[in-house]
Image (cartoon, grey):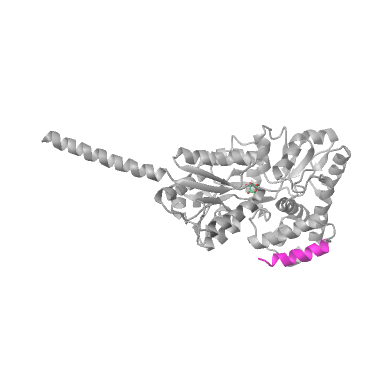
Amino acid sequence: MIKTNWTRRTLLGTAAIMALCASAGAAQAGDLEVLHWWTSGGEAKAISELKDSMQAKGHKWKDFAVAGGAGDAAMTVLKSRVISGNAPTAAQIKGPLLQEWAREGTLSNIDDVAKAEHWDELLLPVISNIVKYQGHYIGVPVNVHRVNWLWVNPEVMRKAGVKPPTTWDEFFTVADTLKKAGVTPLAHGGQSWQDFTTFEAVVLGTGGPEFYRKALIQLDPASLKSPTMEKSLSTFRRLKAYTDRNAPGRDWNLATAMVMKGEAAMQIMGDWAKGEFLSAGKVAGKDFLCVPAPGTAKTYTFNVDSFAMFKVKGEANVQAQRDMAVAIMSPSFQESFNLAKGSIPVRKGVNLSKFDDCAKASATDFADAGKANTLLPSIAHGMAVSPSAEGAIKDVVSQFWNSEQITPAQAMDRLVAAAKSQ
Ligand code: GAL
């Protein structure tokens, strides 16, 4: 009798454990279809960190990569997928665009994860505000990229007897010398988002942080049409003569490769470019230098990548989303991901000892710019204004870059009109 009872209890216990395991197993095996545009060398390495950590948790990773710098193509594909009722599990969505998706009612509220993981304490408000909609978390921030960098090949500069420029006037003197030496001074990819990335650096370096704020964040018409904007536009246009003939259409990472190979001396680009240098085995401070874009020292244009979760069915899939959110904010992921991506950790308390001097400078400058009120959202990378205003302004900037027929005065009128698409 005793034996029977014992056997029964053992059997019940085993059944309970098996049931538990089954449910845990089901919860672990979620499907994660993740939309992103990280396809260059450094980017791919960074996203594989996330894939590995999700697969280690037992989830099925379905990579949904849509190539194209800055994600323009990815965002178009995302729209059509959601409209056809086939949203991915998670997607890389940033800045004010997150708010638009949240307003559509398609994103999951992830407050419970955020609360359990203390995100409010780990994130600065300047970051948590980006990933909250009406006070609720609807996105997971991944990193902080600095956009206003100039990437430099030190060997090319040394051979030509010049130093990295710190102002736009210096830039043109240095660039003339480089051109005479037979080197392309500025590596550029003629795609509208790259034109826009260069333009915002020129505006910041020409007008300073207050002017940038008024013109490109507040979209103040009197600043968009002003002598300082006119000077910014003329300076921007002057740069074109220092790029090469094959620039139109070139991908940003191929422009970075030109600097790496010594075919070009400099590139204006966010620090995802550093991810490229690193994935090619280059060493910061030796094979390449990072300096603030001309005239922009002590300021910081930021670009925060983030993932949003779409409303999905099935507990396992919801659990997979939660696991992804927790993993992204964990110190170990913040370290491994950002080491590959070129950015810095988005949360407080991550040890930077494994990071290079560019990342350390970025972290110090981010903190200092925050205190000095010179920390500015990048308009070219979807941080500053509504997506419609951003798109319209970006078009004006690219048209101006591509057509000598458009005068700075005409471009300014168009900028003022475009800003109204807000
Ligand atoms: C940015 C994005 C970066 C990087 C870059 C080039 O907009 O935030 O993470 O991927 O585009 O694709």
- Of the pair 67 and 290, the residue shown nearer to us: 67
User: In the displayed structure, would residue 263 be above or below residue 237?
Assistant: above
Q: Which residues are magenta?
A: 408-422
Residue 185 visible to an observer of this rendering:
yes
Identity of the residue furthest to the right in this view: 180
x%, y% of residue 202?
A: 76, 52
- Of the pair 405 and 150, the residue shown nearer to us: 405
Residue 232 visible to an observer of this rendering:
no
Quadrant placement of the N terminus = top left
Count of numbered circles on the image: 0
Q: Residue at x 79, y 37 (%)?
A: 263
x%, y% of residue 95?
A: 60, 56
x%, y% of residue 133?
A: 52, 60
Q: Is residue 281 left or right of residue 306?
A: right
| Magenta stretch: dominant secondary structure | helix
Identity of the residue furthest to the left in this view: 1
User: Magenta includes 409?
Assistant: yes
Q: Residue at x 84, y 42 (%)?
A: 174
Q: Residue at x 76, y 38 (%)?
A: 258
x%, y% of residue 321?
A: 47, 49
Identity of the residue furthest to the front in this view: 84
User: In the displayed structure, would residue 210 be above or below residue 26?
Assistant: below
Quadrant placement of the C terminus = bottom right
Q: Residue at x 82, y 53 (%)?
A: 237
User: Magenta includes 212?
Assistant: no
User: In the displayed structure, would residue 351 be above or below residue 145?
Assistant: above
